């Protein structure tokens, strides 16, 4: 890809995207520039990826074809306001913040500008991210495919309609936290049964990763895969029966519904 990619903000998610692009050889490090307020942050990212760095966000806009705005939601508007005069209708602005709709960005930089809203998740840090992507009316199919290629470099991505972003946040963006809680709970049970904690985390984590891979690669319904493990009168069905009685499914659904409601409130 011969596009020049810029990052305003260089936290964990920005570094995950940069790492994915470079590792997959999608973009040369010479064609990437990132800004941050901290000299230490810039030095670390320079050392790790050998990209161009600056403390000036306006320089990022001037030198980039695609600009990924990777700052915290509470300063998004002020950052966009500080650079909007440099954004023409050829540059593509990519957002990764919860609660920042395409319309809210258009209200700042103009509805004639090219905007892509995305929602990646933290497994991007280990190249297993899942990202949702939606665009405004000014983005061409070719441009959308370019953005998708970038986000596929550190995991997987799907193009969705913007109204589904809140659901994406509930089932994907925030979901690693629920999965970590589940792994921790499984490991605690194993520790209570006498297993060393380091082993317990390894067994629980691998079980979750392997199970997810079976869903993605087998094409089978999760319920069918669950039934394959449940022998009549066996240990697994006993655990499933107890989890159902304790309200596992209902708790998960209610938690995700609360997450979706909060996302809508933030919008």
Image (cartoon, helix red, strand yellow):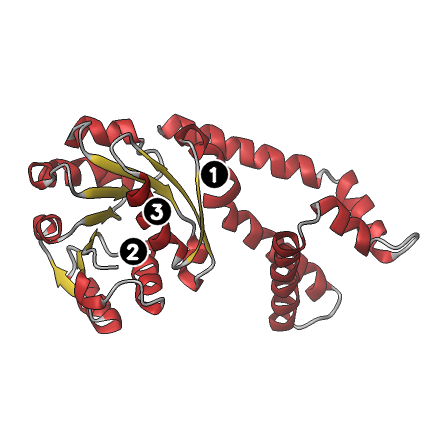
Q: Is residue 97 visible?
A: no
Secondary structure of residue under mark 1: helix
Which part of the image, by quadrant, shows the N terminus? bottom left
Label located before the other in sequence (1 or 2)? 2
Residue under label 1, please give it. Answer: 168
In the rendered view, does 100 fall on the left or right side of 9? right
Secondary structure of residue under mark 3: helix
Q: Which mark is residue 14?
A: 2
Residue 75, quarter of the rendered image: top left
Q: Is residue 201 visible?
A: yes
Q: Residues within 10 Å of mark 3 (few under 14, many from 20)?
A: few
Q: Residues within 10 Å of mark 1 (few under 14, many from 20)?
A: many
Query: Whole-percent x and y of residue 170?
Result: 50, 38
Tell me: residue 138, above or below residue 216: above
Relative depth, front residue between 157 and 246: 157
In the rendered view, does 263 fall on the left or right side of 138? right
Q: Which mark is residue 145?
A: 3
- The residue sitting at 71% across, 64% down in the picture is 190
Query: Whole-percent x and y of residue 56?
Result: 8, 53
Query: Whole-percent x and y of residue 26?
Result: 31, 63
Give the distance between the C-alpha atoms of the residues marked 3 and 1, in whole angstroms.
20 Å
Give the distance between the C-alpha atoms of the residues marked 3 and 2, in whole angstroms.
19 Å
């Amino acid at each position: 890809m011969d596009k020049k990619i810029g990052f305003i903000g260089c936290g964990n998610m920005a570094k995950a995207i940069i790492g994915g692009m470079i590792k997959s050889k999608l973009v040369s490090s010479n064609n990437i520039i990132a800004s941050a307020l901290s000299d230490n942050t810039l030095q670390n990212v320079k050392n790790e990826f050998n990209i161009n760095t600056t403390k000036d966000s306006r320089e990022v806009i001037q030198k980039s074809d695609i600009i990924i705005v990777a700052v915290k939601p509470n300063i998004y508007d002020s950052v966009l306001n500080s650079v909007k005069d440099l954004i023409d209708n050829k540059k593509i602005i990519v957002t990764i913040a919860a609660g920042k709709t395409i319309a809210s960005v258009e209200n700042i930089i103009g509805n004639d500008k090219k905007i892509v809203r995305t929602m990646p998740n933290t497994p991007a840090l280990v190249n297993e991210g899942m990202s949702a992507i939606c665009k405004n009316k000014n983005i061409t199919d070719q441009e959308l495919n370019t953005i998708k290629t970038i986000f596929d470099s550190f995991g997987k991505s799907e193009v969705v309609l913007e109204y589904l972003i809140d659901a994406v946040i509930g089932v994907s963006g925030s979901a690693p936290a629920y999965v970590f809680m589940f792994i921790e709970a499984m490991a605690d049970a194993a520790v209570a049964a006498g297993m060393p904690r380091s082993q317990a985390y390894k067994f629980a984590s691998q079980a979750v990763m392997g199970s997810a891979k079976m869903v993605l690669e087998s094409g089978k319904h999760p319920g069918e895969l669950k039934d394959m493990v449940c022998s009549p009168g066996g240990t697994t069905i006993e655990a499933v029966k107890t989890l159902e009685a304790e309200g596992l499914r209902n708790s998960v659904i209610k938690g995700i519904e609360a997450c979706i409601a909060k996302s809508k409130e933030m919008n």
